[in-house]
Image (tube, rainbow, N blue to C red):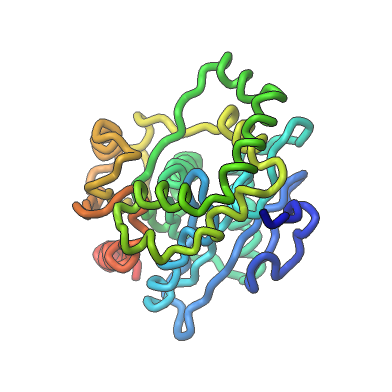
Amino acid sequence: MKKIEFVENKQIKGWPYANSEYFTFGDYKLHYRIDRPKGKEKGKLFMIHGFGCDTTFFNEMVEEYLKKGMRCVRVDLPDFGYSTREIKGINYVPRVEMLEALMAELDKIENDSEKWIIVGHSMGGSVTLELADRNRDAYKALLLYAPLFMSDIPKPVGKLFMAKWMGAMMDTALKYVMPYDTLVRIVLLAATMSPRYMAKYDCSLAANPLKLKDTGKGLCYMSAKASHPAYEDMNKINAPVLLVWGGLDFFVPKSKVNKLSNSLPQGTDIHSIWYAGHCVVQNCAKKCTKFGIDFLKANNLY
């Protein structure tokens, strides 16, 4: 197995990707990437991935949105991709605070006062709604793709997740499981429901970040600390909302689909792609982008 140096030792511009950058916030360094359209810019997207994913998860969707003139900023949440792993002793900061600070910093650099369009997939959809709930007038629009709230973990279970042996066990599991492409492809097939996409996927994109030191500990820490907004507050969000589901999504129960759909503001634009799985933005990126652009046009935002 190829040894990968821990991200903390390589947080420099241009690593691991040509457009990689890092944003420092307290003890944290968030890895993010900016992709700009070749022609006139027509808007800006802030893209938040789901559990176990990273910036590469949006590769296909970024390509499609760039064709439509959208600037795409994608970020690795703490404990994922090439951002800081959370372990005991870190000065903990809620992830939404860091994301707000990153967007504000980018606006300052660009001297840009235009509001962000937030794109969230799965757990990233939960983070997107938490951002919108914290500041209901801050964002131009929300594009939610198969959003899924983190589970409410009871305090005793949270303490178990924070135990030293639990983190060590998770690190060991990732160390010996992630080198196997077959397992990655099985998970991807279940997530996309597309054998064709699974067959051509470069497994190293998903596996390499999960091999980094302390990833298991970080996932335990994040699972114990992560929050999500209240369903009853969702209809108070002022930004227009697009909601896209996969009809073959095995990761989001139908009850959750209905509960969130009924909780969002009146007028939410809801679509389902019947043949798509949970990771709908990967193998159905073109259709997801069309839904997004049509939605923005309908709300006079594009």
Q: Quick one: which residue is furthest to the top in this view? A: 156
Left or right, 213 with reference to 159: right
Q: Quick one: which residue is furthest to the left in this view? A: 274
Left or right, 20 with reference to 122: right
Residue at image x 19%, y 52%?
274
Against 17, is 32 above or below? Answer: above
Residue at image x 71%, y 52%?
29
**Quadrant of the image containing the N terminus:** bottom right
Q: Is residue 144 visible?
A: no
Q: Quick one: which residue is furthest to the bottom in this view? A: 39
Task: Provide residue 102's location: percent of width, then percent of height.
Answer: 63, 55
Task: Provide residue 183's location: percent of width, then percent of height.
Answer: 47, 47
Left or right, 23 with reference to 290: right
Task: Provide residue 154's location: percent of width, then percent of height.
Answer: 52, 17
Q: Quadrant of residue 141?
A: bottom left
Q: Quadrant of residue 259?
A: top left
**Along the viewing direction, whichever of 117 and 288 lies nearer the viewer:** 288
**Along the viewing direction, whichever of 137 and 150 lies nearer the viewer:** 150
**Quadrant of the image containing the C terminus:** bottom left
**Along the viewing direction, whichever of 90 and 179 lies nearer the viewer:** 179
Against 36, is 124 above or below? Answer: above
Q: How many marks?
A: 0
Residue at image x 75%, y 51%?
6
Q: Is residue 31 visible?
A: yes
Left or right, 150 with reference to 89: left
Residue at image x 56%, y 53%?
207
Task: Provide residue 54's location: percent of width, then percent of height.
Answer: 54, 54
